[in-house]
Image (tube, rainbow, N blue to C red):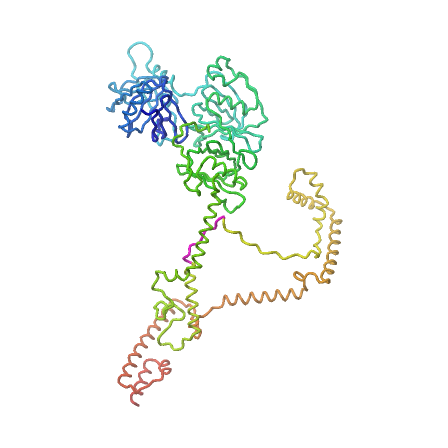
Amino acid sequence: MADFLEYSDILAEVKGTMSSGKLKLTDQHVIFKNSKTGKVEQLAASDIDTVHWQRLVGAWGIRVHLKNGTLHRFGGFRDSEQDKITKFLSTNYKKEMIEKELSLKGWNWGTAKFNGSVLSFDVSHLTAFEIPLNHVSQCTTGKNEVTLEFHQNDDAPVSLMEMRFHIPSSELAGDDPVDAFHQQVMNKASVISATGDAIAIFREIQCLTPRGRYDIKVFSSFFQLHGKTFDYKIPMSTVLRLFLLPHKDNRQMFFVVSLDPPIKQGQTRYHFLVILFSQEEEVSIELPLSEEELQEKYEGRLQKELSGPTYEVMSKVMKALVNRKITVPGNFIGHSGTPAVSCSYKAAAGLMYPLERGFIYVNKPPVHIRFEEITCVNFARSGGSTRSFDFEVETKSGIVHTFSSIEKEEYGKLFDFITSKKLRVKNRGKTDKPSYTEDFGDSDAEDEPDAYLARVKAEAEEREEDEGSTRGGGDGSEEESTDEDFNPNEEHSDVAEEYDSNASASDSDDSGASSSEGGGSAKKKKVEKKEKRDKPKKAKTVSEKPRQRKSKKNKDENMPKRPSTAFMLWLNSNRDSIKADNPGISVTEVSKKGGEMWRELKDKSEWEAKAAKAKEEYSKAMAEYKASGGGGDGGGSKSEKKEKTEKKTEKKTEKKNEKTAPKPSPAKQNQCPRPKRRRKRKNQNLKKKQVMKMKKWKKMRKMMSLLKVHHPQVTLNQEVIKNCNLKEYFQILVISIGTS
């Protein structure tokens, strides 16, 4: 017999919904790990009272009833697994698993029975349904009615919010059955009521989520946020994790509380409480509990008197009451010397903390991603910027979290951290992919080659191969083309005759070599354009070399410098005084402040005189410099410069005229230009005339063929025939035949 049983796809009942996760049965515990939240729930074997095999919706399930009265149900088992689980429970837990029968009559009247924290509604001595009373949020009574209200579960598509029981009045003397029913429900219901004194109170604490300042009152079963506008009561059972994170400025601390289910304010859900403390702020409190109570309830985790920084005192109290560990940053140290990485998430700036078992981002909105949820990570180039990069985290559910605007100095440290945790980088492949399927531990407790460089090298190799193939096999690719209809090199190609500018016609006798060469070049250009159009454009990658900048002209060191203006002379003399009056001012702000002071200055004659004197000295020095032969490149007389500019403008105008002027094709150079577009009617008339001409020439060709057959000695002048109409043509024919 195996020491444990493990099932991967099991559903556990959590506030009216069946949440998926992994179930593991060991010789000492029943362990369930929620795949969504990562919360691990352990049931000790000694605490189990009864175990039943029960039919659930679509599958079989296990009903585990503990000695303290709580009920746990796990579904998703197959019928064949009943014997295996029964043997395991009997050998390890000494418990027999009995099949529980349910009532299928569908009646709405029966008997209500309370068994621990479970309300069972029985029909004909069989259970119709069961209600765990820890799901009840409120219970109200009427004359003969009791109304149960339930906690809302945001993960459920449909939630049961209210149920009413009609209790008939009893004729026997004694307690009222309605009050007795109400009392039984309230004893086990999860109703938050502030009874007794608060264990600790923290005044005017700054919360970032939800935003505001709140008084935090900590009770044994819940803690309360009391603000000016809103109040929140949060049960300790909803606290999932605790985080204590240092701010990047080393003067503040974040205390983050993860909640499941979240607190609500209208339609807004707060899955995290983010509290900000100053490291210098201190507090001292005295707990209203005796030493014996502290030892019994909290096993020495709390002392009667606590003092120190506020974040330390509050984290100690919450850790003892919630009975969960506090997660702090691990060994990761960023470029700034702190465990925080500055970035942006959803257009809001914040800090990302790489932890031992996940990533957490604060603030707005806070995000916690566990390593076991992550499919892969990716380093991407930020949009248009080379000083920063994006860090993308893809989860198993398909959600991609993008943390952008990370400084490129953080890349090396972050990549080393990811490789040490054996997370799969998207561009590296599926090697060394970690397996978290066998991990049932608490998610709060716990040199590869550079993928970026590898991707860059691979892209460079692909580009080199493409270039080599285009250089070496250019002719071969053209020969292997499947487009056989278009072959411009053939003389009698139908496509060439119809569309090329050098259409080879059988009747035309004056087609020279020059026109054929021109037509061939035009064909080649068309083929090249088509190939360029069909060729897919390559996306720019990081590996591409930067564009070479144009080399600047070498400046002459002997050339005199231009004189400063009156404002710059005044600013240089008063720069130190401006810095002294405004400590910590930047260079750009100095000039801005100086500009404001210069505008307010009334007497500027002294500095204007100095500027005029400097200008005179500059003009003299420039004249001497030009006389000595300096300024060959940039100097020269004004007339020479004017001539150069005029020549440049003439060249530009010539180029423009060449572009704008229509370029006739070689075959149509001797023809008249096409007429301009006219109105619709005129175009129709032209078409009619063209049709008439075509008909005329067809008739003329027939007559000529007949004439040559019957009268081969007759010759006609072609120019005369072209310029005459049809009647004149027949007259000429008759005359020619008569003379012959």
Q: Is residue 537 magenta?
A: yes
Q: Is residue 518 above or below residue 70?
A: below
Measuring 58% from the left and 33% from the top, which residue is drawn there? 249
Task: Residue 141: tell me if it is visible.
Answer: no
Question: From the viewer's perspective, is residue 697 above or below residue 448?
Answer: below
In-front residue for pair 696/99: 99
Q: Does the magenta stretch include residue 208?
A: no
Q: How many marks?
A: 0
- Residue 731 lies, in percent from the top left, at 31, 85
Q: Give whichever of 697, 507 is nearer the camera.
A: 507
Q: In this view, does 305 lie to the left or right of 682?
A: right
Q: Which residue is drawn at 54% across and 36% down?
A: 334
Please identify the quarter of the rendering in which residue 99 is found.
top left
Figure quadrant of the N terminus = top left
Magenta span: chief secondary structure: loop
Q: Give the range drawn in magenta.
A: 533-542
Q: Position of residue 312 (x, y in %)?
A: 54, 24
Q: Can residue 720 be seen in this view?
A: yes
- Coordinates of residue 723 in the picture (x, y in percent): 37, 81
Image height of 225 relative to 360, above or below: above
Instruction: Give the left or right position of residue 78, taking residue 561 as reference.
Output: left
> Relative to 134, is 244 on the left or the right?
right
Q: Quadrant of residue 525?
A: bottom left
Question: Which residue is outermost to the top?
Answer: 173
- Give the x, y percent position of residue 404: 50, 41
